[in-house]
């Protein structure tokens, strides 16, 4: 069987997640951290566990193998959002350097998991560079879109380009808007979720014009998330296979748009693990390998 790391939509084969038990730990840790980390309100631990159990079963529905991030006292409750700490390539993992200071320990914790499971490391982003996985998405086998945001800076992008230069990978820089400012969790994948080679879910009011035109030039059909479903994670859609989607429940209009173009859609209640922390299914997962 052939695999690739350079895809956001092929069948999910191997993925890293971090359970509520390991990330949130208990009610006391949630109580101590949620305000400082800019959550909308304190997640409920037991409800969060129930939500995550459903989410994990949906991930496995296409036969994906699961790697689990271990509990580590150095990381915050944000460590549930595993995508951000690393970028995967066919040449090895790039360990990020987080733009949110409280999240800086996370890549080291993930590095242990990758080495234990024989996933090679290509390199890492070093200070003063910052780079977060939520700002990075493959457009095709040789093109990587990278959002220049408050979480991902110019130096981090330059380091990533240097790491990928020997492999003829084009890095397409996407200049993201200010939106709510440095304290908000706003990544490229907050407004762009590829679900097939020629299909993506987008929120155009915050999608840079140059990037939107590039997607259309590539022949992508863009499903426009309505304004009322943006804050409820309507634009954060994870493909576990081509047009086989996983999304937060309650975004009925976006779900209907996906179904109308032939997508199979699964939903999970994500009030505690997604909405309150601003991290949908793409954030909750670090896909490592997909089946071609």
Image (cartoon, grey):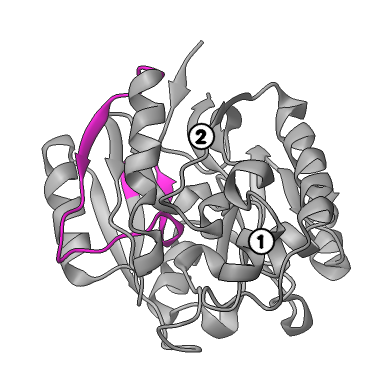
- The residue under label 2 is 70
Q: Residue at x 40, y 65 (%)?
A: 102
Q: Is residue 56 above or below residue 227?
A: above
Q: Name the residue at the front extreme.
A: 28
Q: Are marks 2 and 1 in contact (CB under 8 Å)?
A: no
Q: Is residue 61 above or below residue 31?
A: above
Q: Residue at x 53, y 82 (%)?
A: 206
- The residue under label 1 is 28
Tell me residue 12's x, y (percent): 60, 30
> Judging from the image, what secondary structure is the residue with disc 2 in?
loop
Q: Nearer the viewer, mark 2 or mark 1?
A: 1
Is 84 or 110 nearer to us in this picture?
110
Q: Is residue 15 above or below residue 34?
A: above
Tell me residue 224's x, y (percent): 68, 72
Is 12 or 281 nearer to us in this picture?
281
Q: Is residue 74 above or below residue 36?
A: above
Q: Residue at x 65, y 52 (%)?
A: 281
Is 4 or 149 nearer to us in this picture?
149
Tell me residue 164's x, y (percent): 19, 43
Q: Is residue 32 visible in the rendered structure shown here?
A: yes
Disc 2 or 1, which lies upstream in sequence?
1
Q: Residues within 10 Å of mark 2 (few under 14, many from 20)?
A: some
């Amino acid at each position: 069987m052939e695999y690739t790391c350079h895809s956001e939509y092929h069948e999910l084969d191997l993925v890293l997640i971090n359970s509520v038990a390991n990330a949130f730990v208990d009610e006391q840790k949630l109580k101590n951290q949620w305000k400082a980390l800019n959550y909308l309100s304190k997640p409920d631990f037991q409800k969060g566990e129930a939500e995550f159990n459903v989410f994990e079963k949906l991930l496995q529905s296409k036969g994906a193998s699961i790697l689990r991030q271990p509990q580590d006292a150095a990381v915050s409750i944000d460590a549930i959002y595993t995508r951000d700490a690393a970028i995967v390539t066919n040449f090895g993992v790039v360990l990020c350097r987080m733009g949110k200071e409280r999240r800086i320990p996370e890549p080291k914790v993930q590095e242990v998991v990758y080495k234990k499971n024989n996933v090679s490391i290509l390199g890492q982003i070093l200070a003063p560079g910052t780079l977060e996985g939520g700002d990075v998405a493959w457009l095709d086998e040789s093109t990587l879109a990278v959002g220049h945001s408050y979480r991902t800076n110019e130096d981090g992008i330059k380091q990533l380009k240097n790491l990928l230069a020997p492999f003829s990978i084009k890095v397409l820089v996407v200049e993201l808007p200010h939106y709510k400012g440095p304290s908000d969790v706003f990544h490229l994948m907050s407004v762009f979720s590829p679900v097939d080679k020629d299909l993506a879910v987008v929120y155009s009011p915050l999608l840079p014009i140059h990037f939107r035109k590039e997607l259309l030039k590539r022949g992508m059909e863009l499903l426009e998330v309505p304004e009322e479903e943006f804050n409820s994670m309507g634009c954060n859609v994870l493909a576990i296979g081509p047009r086989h989607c996983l999304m937060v429940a309650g975004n009925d209009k976006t779900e209907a748009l996906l179904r109308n173009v032939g997508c199979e859609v699964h939903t999970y209640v994500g009030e505690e693990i997604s909405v309150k922390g601003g991290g949908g299914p793409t954030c909750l997962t670090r896909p490592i390998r997909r089946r071609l």
